[in-house]
Amino acid sequence: MSNSKGKLVLVAGGAGFLGSHLCDALITDGARVICLDNLRTGTLENLQHLKREPRFTLVEADICEPLPAALTSRRRRIEAIFNLACSASPAHYQADPVHTLLSSVLGSRNLLELAEQTNARFLLASTSEVYGDPQVHPQTERYWGNVNPTGPRACYDEGKRAAEALTYDFARTRRTSVRVARIFNTYGPRMRTDDGRVISNIICQALAGRDITIYGDGEQTRSFCYVVDLVEGLLRLMWLPGKVLGPVNLGNPAEVSVKELARRVIEMTGSTSRITSQPLPIDDPRRRKPDISLARALLGWSPKVSLNEGLAATIAWFTKKEGLGSRQRSSRGVASVDGTGQPAPMLVPSAAARGRA
Protein backbone atom coordinates (compact mmCIF):
# COMPACT_ATOMS: atom_id res chain seq x y z
CA MET A 1 0.00 0.00 0.00
CA SER A 2 1.28 3.48 -0.88
CA ASN A 3 2.18 5.89 1.90
CA SER A 4 0.06 8.53 0.16
CA LYS A 5 -3.23 6.65 0.42
CA GLY A 6 -5.95 8.56 2.25
CA LYS A 7 -3.70 11.49 3.16
CA LEU A 8 -4.57 15.12 2.46
CA VAL A 9 -1.62 16.58 0.56
CA LEU A 10 -1.01 20.17 -0.53
CA VAL A 11 1.03 20.70 -3.70
CA ALA A 12 2.05 24.35 -4.07
CA GLY A 13 2.87 24.97 -7.72
CA GLY A 14 0.74 21.97 -8.68
CA ALA A 15 -0.37 23.40 -12.04
CA GLY A 16 3.19 23.56 -13.34
CA PHE A 17 5.16 21.03 -15.34
CA LEU A 18 6.59 19.10 -12.41
CA GLY A 19 3.78 19.88 -9.97
CA SER A 20 1.03 18.52 -12.22
CA HIS A 21 2.88 15.21 -12.60
CA LEU A 22 3.24 15.06 -8.82
CA CYS A 23 -0.52 15.66 -8.43
CA ASP A 24 -1.15 12.78 -10.85
CA ALA A 25 1.10 10.41 -8.91
CA LEU A 26 -0.51 11.33 -5.58
CA ILE A 27 -4.03 10.82 -6.94
CA THR A 28 -2.98 7.48 -8.43
CA ASP A 29 -1.60 6.47 -5.03
CA GLY A 30 -4.89 7.26 -3.30
CA ALA A 31 -4.19 10.68 -1.77
CA ARG A 32 -6.55 13.63 -1.59
CA VAL A 33 -4.79 16.54 -3.26
CA ILE A 34 -5.10 20.31 -2.92
CA CYS A 35 -3.29 22.08 -5.75
CA LEU A 36 -2.28 25.66 -4.87
CA ASP A 37 -1.14 27.78 -7.81
CA ASN A 38 -1.26 31.40 -8.97
CA LEU A 39 -1.21 30.25 -12.62
CA ARG A 40 1.63 32.62 -13.54
CA THR A 41 3.52 29.82 -15.28
CA GLY A 42 1.37 26.81 -14.41
CA THR A 43 -1.65 26.16 -16.61
CA LEU A 44 -5.18 24.83 -16.21
CA GLU A 45 -4.48 22.66 -19.24
CA ASN A 46 -2.02 20.62 -17.15
CA LEU A 47 -4.87 19.81 -14.75
CA GLN A 48 -7.74 19.39 -17.21
CA HIS A 49 -7.79 15.60 -16.81
CA LEU A 50 -8.29 16.02 -13.03
CA LYS A 51 -11.27 18.37 -13.37
CA ARG A 52 -13.83 15.73 -12.35
CA GLU A 53 -11.60 13.89 -9.89
CA PRO A 54 -13.39 14.05 -6.49
CA ARG A 55 -10.11 13.79 -4.56
CA PHE A 56 -8.60 16.83 -6.32
CA THR A 57 -9.15 20.50 -5.45
CA LEU A 58 -7.60 23.55 -7.13
CA VAL A 59 -7.05 26.70 -5.07
CA GLU A 60 -5.90 29.70 -7.11
CA ALA A 61 -3.71 31.89 -4.89
CA ASP A 62 -0.19 33.27 -4.56
CA ILE A 63 1.98 31.89 -1.75
CA CYS A 64 3.55 35.34 -1.33
CA GLU A 65 0.18 36.58 -0.03
CA PRO A 66 -1.58 35.43 3.16
CA LEU A 67 -2.82 31.91 2.49
CA PRO A 68 -6.57 31.57 1.85
CA ALA A 69 -8.91 30.35 4.55
CA ALA A 70 -9.53 27.21 2.50
CA LEU A 71 -6.05 26.10 3.55
CA THR A 72 -5.73 27.54 7.04
CA SER A 73 -9.08 26.34 8.40
CA ARG A 74 -8.59 24.07 11.39
CA ARG A 75 -11.16 21.73 9.88
CA ARG A 76 -8.58 20.70 7.29
CA ARG A 77 -5.94 18.22 8.38
CA ILE A 78 -3.19 18.66 5.80
CA GLU A 79 -0.61 15.94 6.37
CA ALA A 80 2.05 16.84 3.82
CA ILE A 81 3.06 19.99 1.92
CA PHE A 82 5.18 19.95 -1.24
CA ASN A 83 6.52 23.42 -2.06
CA LEU A 84 7.16 23.53 -5.81
CA ALA A 85 5.82 27.07 -6.21
CA CYS A 86 8.51 28.98 -8.06
CA SER A 87 9.25 29.46 -11.74
CA ALA A 88 12.21 27.26 -12.66
CA SER A 89 13.11 28.44 -16.15
CA PRO A 90 15.43 31.45 -16.58
CA ALA A 91 13.06 33.14 -19.04
CA HIS A 92 10.25 33.07 -16.49
CA TYR A 93 12.06 33.68 -13.22
CA GLN A 94 14.05 36.58 -14.69
CA ALA A 95 10.87 38.21 -16.04
CA ASP A 96 9.89 39.22 -12.50
CA PRO A 97 12.96 38.67 -10.33
CA VAL A 98 11.50 40.31 -7.23
CA HIS A 99 8.48 38.00 -7.23
CA THR A 100 10.77 35.04 -7.84
CA LEU A 101 12.85 35.86 -4.78
CA LEU A 102 9.78 36.51 -2.63
CA SER A 103 8.20 33.23 -3.76
CA SER A 104 11.20 31.35 -2.43
CA VAL A 105 11.50 33.25 0.84
CA LEU A 106 8.16 34.75 1.84
CA GLY A 107 6.20 31.99 0.14
CA SER A 108 8.25 29.28 1.85
CA ARG A 109 7.72 30.98 5.21
CA ASN A 110 3.95 31.02 4.69
CA LEU A 111 3.90 27.33 3.80
CA LEU A 112 6.25 26.38 6.64
CA GLU A 113 3.95 28.17 9.09
CA LEU A 114 1.01 26.25 7.62
CA ALA A 115 2.96 23.02 8.12
CA GLU A 116 3.61 24.02 11.72
CA GLN A 117 -0.07 24.82 12.27
CA THR A 118 -1.30 21.52 10.80
CA ASN A 119 1.62 19.35 11.98
CA ALA A 120 2.33 18.45 8.35
CA ARG A 121 5.56 17.27 6.81
CA PHE A 122 7.11 19.89 4.54
CA LEU A 123 9.20 19.24 1.43
CA LEU A 124 11.03 22.07 -0.32
CA ALA A 125 11.75 21.60 -4.00
CA SER A 126 15.17 23.24 -4.13
CA THR A 127 17.49 23.13 -7.10
CA SER A 128 20.93 22.25 -8.40
CA GLU A 129 21.24 25.99 -9.07
CA VAL A 130 22.33 26.35 -5.44
CA TYR A 131 25.66 24.92 -6.68
CA GLY A 132 25.98 27.73 -9.25
CA ASP A 133 28.82 27.19 -11.74
CA PRO A 134 30.36 24.36 -9.73
CA GLN A 135 34.06 23.92 -9.11
CA VAL A 136 33.44 20.41 -7.77
CA HIS A 137 32.29 17.66 -10.12
CA PRO A 138 30.03 15.78 -9.71
CA GLN A 139 28.17 17.80 -7.09
CA THR A 140 27.50 16.24 -3.69
CA GLU A 141 25.20 17.65 -1.05
CA ARG A 142 28.27 18.67 0.98
CA TYR A 143 29.38 21.14 -1.71
CA TRP A 144 28.50 24.74 -0.79
CA GLY A 145 28.46 25.99 -4.34
CA ASN A 146 29.88 28.79 -6.47
CA VAL A 147 27.04 31.27 -6.95
CA ASN A 148 27.02 34.90 -8.10
CA PRO A 149 24.84 36.53 -5.41
CA THR A 150 24.08 39.67 -7.47
CA GLY A 151 23.85 38.37 -11.05
CA PRO A 152 20.73 37.97 -13.21
CA ARG A 153 20.19 34.39 -11.98
CA ALA A 154 20.54 35.32 -8.30
CA CYS A 155 16.80 35.85 -7.79
CA TYR A 156 16.37 32.12 -8.29
CA ASP A 157 19.70 30.72 -7.06
CA GLU A 158 19.91 32.82 -3.91
CA GLY A 159 16.17 32.60 -3.36
CA LYS A 160 16.41 28.82 -3.17
CA ARG A 161 19.48 29.00 -0.92
CA ALA A 162 17.54 31.30 1.42
CA ALA A 163 14.54 28.97 1.30
CA GLU A 164 16.78 26.06 2.31
CA ALA A 165 18.15 28.08 5.24
CA LEU A 166 14.64 29.02 6.35
CA THR A 167 13.45 25.43 6.05
CA TYR A 168 16.24 24.14 8.24
CA ASP A 169 15.70 26.97 10.75
CA PHE A 170 12.15 25.67 11.20
CA ALA A 171 13.55 22.16 11.66
CA ARG A 172 16.22 23.25 14.17
CA THR A 173 13.65 25.07 16.27
CA ARG A 174 11.43 21.96 16.11
CA ARG A 175 8.56 23.78 14.45
CA THR A 176 7.96 21.18 11.73
CA SER A 177 9.43 18.10 10.03
CA VAL A 178 11.21 18.99 6.79
CA ARG A 179 12.85 17.54 3.71
CA VAL A 180 14.80 19.34 0.97
CA ALA A 181 15.25 17.96 -2.55
CA ARG A 182 17.91 19.54 -4.76
CA ILE A 183 16.45 18.92 -8.19
CA PHE A 184 18.67 18.73 -11.27
CA ASN A 185 17.50 19.28 -14.88
CA THR A 186 14.13 17.59 -15.37
CA TYR A 187 12.15 17.18 -18.59
CA GLY A 188 9.12 15.48 -20.08
CA PRO A 189 5.56 16.09 -21.28
CA ARG A 190 3.86 19.34 -20.18
CA MET A 191 6.98 21.47 -20.51
CA ARG A 192 6.05 24.85 -21.95
CA THR A 193 7.28 25.72 -25.42
CA ASP A 194 8.28 29.20 -24.22
CA ASP A 195 10.08 28.29 -20.99
CA GLY A 196 13.56 28.69 -22.46
CA ARG A 197 14.96 25.43 -21.11
CA VAL A 198 17.33 23.51 -23.29
CA ILE A 199 15.32 20.36 -24.01
CA SER A 200 12.05 22.14 -24.85
CA ASN A 201 13.93 24.69 -26.98
CA ILE A 202 15.79 22.06 -28.97
CA ILE A 203 12.78 19.79 -29.49
CA CYS A 204 10.47 22.61 -30.61
CA GLN A 205 13.07 24.06 -32.97
CA ALA A 206 13.81 20.63 -34.45
CA LEU A 207 10.15 19.77 -34.97
CA ALA A 208 9.52 23.14 -36.63
CA GLY A 209 12.58 22.76 -38.86
CA ARG A 210 14.12 25.96 -37.49
CA ASP A 211 17.79 26.45 -36.68
CA ILE A 212 18.60 24.96 -33.28
CA THR A 213 20.17 27.50 -30.97
CA ILE A 214 22.89 26.43 -28.58
CA TYR A 215 24.83 28.81 -26.37
CA GLY A 216 28.60 29.02 -26.32
CA ASP A 217 30.43 26.11 -27.92
CA GLY A 218 27.81 23.58 -26.82
CA GLU A 219 30.34 21.57 -24.83
CA GLN A 220 28.76 22.54 -21.51
CA THR A 221 27.14 19.49 -19.93
CA ARG A 222 23.86 18.75 -18.21
CA SER A 223 22.26 15.68 -16.65
CA PHE A 224 18.62 15.20 -17.61
CA CYS A 225 16.11 13.31 -15.48
CA TYR A 226 12.74 12.22 -16.87
CA VAL A 227 9.85 13.68 -14.91
CA VAL A 228 8.32 10.37 -13.80
CA ASP A 229 11.61 9.31 -12.22
CA LEU A 230 11.95 12.66 -10.47
CA VAL A 231 8.42 12.50 -9.04
CA GLU A 232 9.18 9.06 -7.66
CA GLY A 233 12.21 10.48 -5.88
CA LEU A 234 10.13 13.28 -4.35
CA LEU A 235 7.54 10.82 -3.04
CA ARG A 236 10.15 8.55 -1.52
CA LEU A 237 11.81 11.49 0.18
CA MET A 238 8.54 12.86 1.57
CA TRP A 239 7.39 9.55 3.04
CA LEU A 240 10.76 8.41 4.37
CA PRO A 241 10.28 7.63 8.07
CA GLY A 242 12.10 9.67 10.69
CA LYS A 243 14.23 12.77 10.30
CA VAL A 244 16.16 13.63 7.15
CA LEU A 245 19.15 15.64 8.32
CA GLY A 246 20.14 17.42 5.11
CA PRO A 247 19.29 18.03 1.44
CA VAL A 248 19.15 15.18 -1.05
CA ASN A 249 20.20 15.44 -4.71
CA LEU A 250 17.61 14.13 -7.17
CA GLY A 251 18.66 13.88 -10.80
CA ASN A 252 20.06 11.61 -13.45
CA PRO A 253 23.87 11.29 -13.30
CA ALA A 254 24.12 10.45 -17.02
CA GLU A 255 25.97 13.50 -18.35
CA VAL A 256 25.63 14.78 -21.93
CA SER A 257 26.83 17.91 -23.72
CA VAL A 258 24.29 20.35 -25.10
CA LYS A 259 25.71 19.85 -28.60
CA GLU A 260 25.29 16.08 -28.34
CA LEU A 261 21.74 16.55 -27.08
CA ALA A 262 20.92 18.69 -30.14
CA ARG A 263 22.41 16.09 -32.49
CA ARG A 264 20.42 13.34 -30.81
CA VAL A 265 17.11 15.25 -31.10
CA ILE A 266 17.79 16.03 -34.77
CA GLU A 267 18.35 12.32 -35.43
CA MET A 268 15.28 11.21 -33.48
CA THR A 269 12.96 13.71 -35.18
CA GLY A 270 14.45 13.36 -38.67
CA SER A 271 14.75 17.15 -38.67
CA THR A 272 16.59 19.19 -41.29
CA SER A 273 17.50 21.81 -38.69
CA ARG A 274 21.02 23.20 -38.47
CA ILE A 275 22.83 23.90 -35.22
CA THR A 276 23.70 27.56 -34.65
CA SER A 277 25.38 29.23 -31.70
CA GLN A 278 24.78 32.32 -29.59
CA PRO A 279 26.91 33.83 -26.80
CA LEU A 280 26.78 31.99 -23.48
CA PRO A 281 24.46 33.75 -20.97
CA ILE A 282 25.95 35.32 -17.85
CA ASP A 283 26.68 32.81 -15.06
CA ASP A 284 25.54 29.84 -17.15
CA PRO A 285 27.20 26.77 -15.55
CA ARG A 286 29.73 24.84 -17.61
CA ARG A 287 29.08 21.47 -15.99
CA ARG A 288 26.25 20.02 -13.98
CA LYS A 289 26.01 16.42 -12.75
CA PRO A 290 24.51 15.11 -9.51
CA ASP A 291 26.15 12.68 -7.16
CA ILE A 292 23.10 10.64 -6.11
CA SER A 293 24.88 8.30 -3.70
CA LEU A 294 22.78 9.64 -0.82
CA ALA A 295 19.49 9.17 -2.68
CA ARG A 296 20.46 5.60 -3.54
CA ALA A 297 21.41 4.80 0.06
CA LEU A 298 18.62 6.70 1.82
CA LEU A 299 15.71 6.26 -0.57
CA GLY A 300 16.68 3.24 -2.66
CA TRP A 301 16.12 5.55 -5.62
CA SER A 302 17.84 6.00 -8.95
CA PRO A 303 16.47 7.01 -12.37
CA LYS A 304 15.11 4.23 -14.58
CA VAL A 305 14.21 6.01 -17.83
CA SER A 306 17.08 6.47 -20.28
CA LEU A 307 17.60 9.76 -22.10
CA ASN A 308 16.55 8.27 -25.45
CA GLU A 309 13.35 6.83 -23.96
CA GLY A 310 12.48 10.08 -22.24
CA LEU A 311 13.26 12.16 -25.30
CA ALA A 312 11.05 9.94 -27.45
CA ALA A 313 8.09 10.37 -25.12
CA THR A 314 8.70 14.13 -24.87
CA ILE A 315 9.04 14.56 -28.64
CA ALA A 316 5.79 12.64 -29.14
CA TRP A 317 4.01 14.90 -26.66
CA PHE A 318 5.24 18.12 -28.30
CA THR A 319 4.38 16.72 -31.72
CA LYS A 320 0.79 16.06 -30.67
CA LYS A 321 0.27 19.18 -28.56
CA GLU A 322 1.78 21.76 -30.87
CA GLY A 323 1.05 20.08 -34.20
CA LEU A 324 4.73 20.36 -34.94
CA GLY A 325 6.92 18.11 -37.00
CA SER A 326 4.44 16.81 -39.59
CA ARG A 327 7.00 17.44 -42.32
CA GLN A 328 10.05 16.75 -40.17
CA ARG A 329 9.27 13.36 -38.64
CA SER A 330 10.80 10.19 -39.95
CA SER A 331 9.69 6.64 -39.25
CA ARG A 332 12.52 6.25 -36.76
CA GLY A 333 11.71 9.51 -34.98
CA VAL A 334 9.31 9.64 -32.09
CA ALA A 335 8.75 5.89 -31.88
CA SER A 336 12.02 4.87 -30.29
CA VAL A 337 10.38 3.89 -26.99
CA ASP A 338 8.38 0.98 -28.37
CA GLY A 339 9.57 0.64 -31.97
CA THR A 340 6.02 0.56 -33.35
CA GLY A 341 6.21 3.68 -35.50
CA GLN A 342 3.47 5.29 -33.36
CA PRO A 343 4.00 8.24 -31.02
CA ALA A 344 5.50 7.09 -27.75
CA PRO A 345 3.29 7.17 -24.66
CA MET A 346 4.21 9.01 -21.50
CA LEU A 347 6.30 6.62 -19.42
CA VAL A 348 4.69 5.86 -16.07
CA PRO A 349 6.19 3.02 -14.01
CA SER A 350 3.77 0.82 -12.13
CA ALA A 351 3.54 1.12 -8.36
CA ALA A 352 5.22 -2.26 -8.00
CA ALA A 353 8.09 -1.19 -10.22
CA ARG A 354 8.47 1.95 -8.14
CA GLY A 355 8.86 -0.16 -5.02
CA ARG A 356 6.08 1.52 -3.06
CA ALA A 357 3.27 -0.98 -3.54
Image: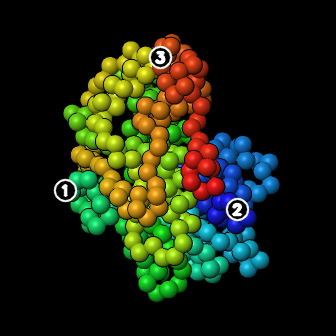
Q: Can residue 47 be seen in this view?
A: yes
Task: Please report whichever mark, 2 or 1, sits nearer to the chain's N-terminal start.
Answer: 2
Task: Please report whichever mark, 2 or 3, sits nearer to the chain's N-terminal start.
Answer: 2
Identified at 47% across, 80% down, the residue is 171
Q: Distance between the residues labelled 2 and 3?
A: 40 Å
Residue tagged 1: 135
Residue tagged 3: 332
The residue mark sitting in front, 2 or 1, is: 2
Residue tagged 2: 5
x, y (%) of residue 333?
48, 19
Is residue 219 shown left or right of residue 244?
left
**How many residues crowd around disc 3 within 10 Å: few (fewer than 14), some, or many (20 or more)?**
some
Task: Please report whichever mark, 1 or 3, sits nearer to the chain's N-terminal start.
Answer: 1
The residue mark sitting in front, 1 or 3, is: 3
Q: Which amino acid does label 2 sit on?
A: Lys
Identified at 34% across, 31% down, the residue is 261
Q: Residue furthest bottom?
A: 173
Find out whether the residues at labels 2 and 3 contact each other: C-beta distance under 8 Å: no
Is residue 150 shown left or right of residue 190?
left
x, y (%) of residue 254?
34, 42
Q: In this view, does 109 lie above or below 296?
A: below
Instruction: Give 101 or 313, whichever is nearer the viewer.
Output: 313
